[in-house]
Image (cartoon, rainbow, N blue to C red):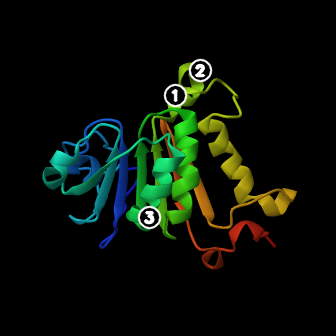
Amino acid sequence: TSTFNVRFADSQGFYLSNGMIASANLIGDAASPYPVFPEILIPAGGRIGIDIQDKRDISKEAGATIMLGDQGSSEFWDKATQLIGNPHIIIDDGSHRSEDQLLTFDMLWPRLRDNGLYIVEDIHTSYREAYGGGLNNPDSFVEFTKRGIDAMHSSEHGGKGDSHLFSVQVYPNLAVFEKRAPHTWGGSTMRPS
């Protein structure tokens, strides 16, 4: 049984890569380096990729729109967010630097549709100082992920919450954030009876 069995019949996917973007990376077939996602189905034309290296020439082959950009640039995101719309799935497999992962999350989480998934790969780099991390470094993506659990339970401690953050799932080298509309589950204000 796979970790995920996700189907979005008419979804728009967004893939951020530091290397080659190919349709196999997005749909998770047998050739994919992402065996955790065997059935993410995104129709052709609904895929958007961003790469720091110019790979726009493979857009047609990849079945995706590929934009040139730097994940660590807020100026880039100010422009890019106008073009990417509201995807159902976001996969961040970019620079693996905590500061870039955090900036990207801040810019794209609000654009993710309800019932969408935000997936960040290679979170193990949060433990490496060369990537802006280190064990218990409050500025690392892993520590941000841990704070997501607190945000989901803000009604219990009175802190800041995110009423759309439904779940945080962590796997080796991978974090998955699930977004849902608060009225579908009670949001971060829900208290058990």
Q: Nearer the viewer, mark 3 or mark 2?
A: 3
Q: Which secondary structure, mark 1?
A: helix
Residue 26 in picture, x, y percent from top left: 28, 52
Q: Which one is earlier in the sequence, the residue at label 3 or at label 2?
A: 3
Instruction: Judge whether residue 132 can be spotted in this image.
Output: yes
Tell which tag, 3 or 1, sits nearer the viewer.
3
**Residue type, mark 1 in image:** Thr
Location of mark 3 (residue): 82
In screen coordinates, is 157 left or right of 134?
right
Instruction: Indicate the position of residue 115 as horizontal and vertical percent values.
Output: 49, 69
Q: Is residue 22 above or below residue 27?
A: above
What residue is disc 1 on? 125
Q: Quadrant of residue 53?
A: top left
Q: Where is residue 21 shown, x and y percent of the image?
A: 26, 44
* Mark 3 → mark 1, Cα distance in angstroms: 29 Å
Could you tell me the amino acid type at mark 2?
Answer: Glu
Q: Residue at the location (35% across, 51% down)?
A: 15
**Mark 2 nearby-residue class (10 Å; few <14, some 14–19, many ≥20):** some
> Spatial distance from mark 2 to mark 1, Cα to Cα?
8 Å
Q: Is residue 23 above or below residue 33?
A: below
Residue 184 location (% of width, % of height): 60, 78
Q: Of the residues shown, which amino acid type is indicated by label 3? A: Gln
